[in-house]
Amino acid sequence: MPRWLSWSWRGLMAVTTASVSWSTACGVTGILTAGFYILTALATIMYYRRRVFSNAWDALLAGVLPFAAAAFLAWIVVRSLQAAPASQRLSVAAIVAVGVVVMPVARFALRSEFFQIPRECASREP
């Protein structure tokens, strides 16, 4: 095989590997971002929980719409994970597993001040 062809092949393999790595990173980032927005929508419902039960308009704006958005994003995440290659699914699973392990360590072993902050809630009146 000519030397120039060997180098061309190596360059092609490097570009292909970088492309696959970039695609995996972007896919994982999108799925994790959707998960972050799901948690944000649920946190919004929890913060405005008193207003959700005060009248119908607030129930729609602070309860139903954020919940519908979270449900829609959850559906997108599930469908994305079903269609994702194994490398993306394993990456997402590893990131979530590390988070599940590190959070109790931060709370109980390191006694992080974050977990000592009292929960807040919006008042019933706007």
Image: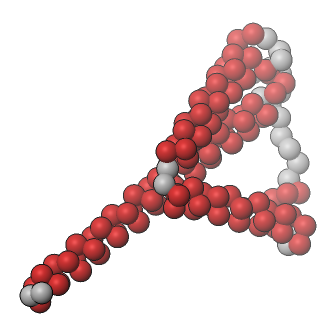
Examine the image and state in which quarter residue 71 appears.
Answer: top right
Residue closest to the eye, 125 or 31: 31
The residue most toward the top is 56
Examine the image and state in which quarter residue 47 appears.
Answer: top right
Residue at 78%, 65% (x, y): give it. Answer: 101
In the image, residue 110 sits, relative to residue 28, either above or below, namely below
Q: In x, y percent, where is residue 36?
A: 62, 46
Residue at 45%, 59% (x, y): give it. Answer: 24
Q: In x, y percent, where is residue 102?
A: 77, 67
Residue at 23%, 80% (x, y): give it. Answer: 10
Question: How many numbered circles are shown?
Answer: 0
Residue closest to the eye, 82 or 40: 82
Examine the image and state in which quarter residue 125 appears.
Answer: top right
Question: Visible in this render: residue 26?
Answer: yes
In the image, residue 24 sits, relative to residue 111, either above or below, namely above
Q: In x, y percent, where is residue 22?
A: 39, 62
Image-based side of 22 in relation to 96, left or right = left
Residue at 20%, 77% (x, y): give it. Answer: 9
Q: In x, y percent, where is residue 111?
A: 88, 68
Residue closest to the eye, 113 or 108: 108
In the image, residue 76 sits, relative to residue 27, either above or below, namely above
The residue most toward the bottom is 3
Image-based side of 71 in relation to 101, left or right = left
Question: Visible in this render: residue 66?
Answer: no
Image-based side of 70 in relation to 51, left or right = left
Q: Quadrant of the N terminus?
A: bottom left
In the image, residue 86 sits, relative to residue 34, either above or below, namely below
Q: How is the image coloured?
A: secondary structure
Q: Quadrant of the C terminus?
A: top right
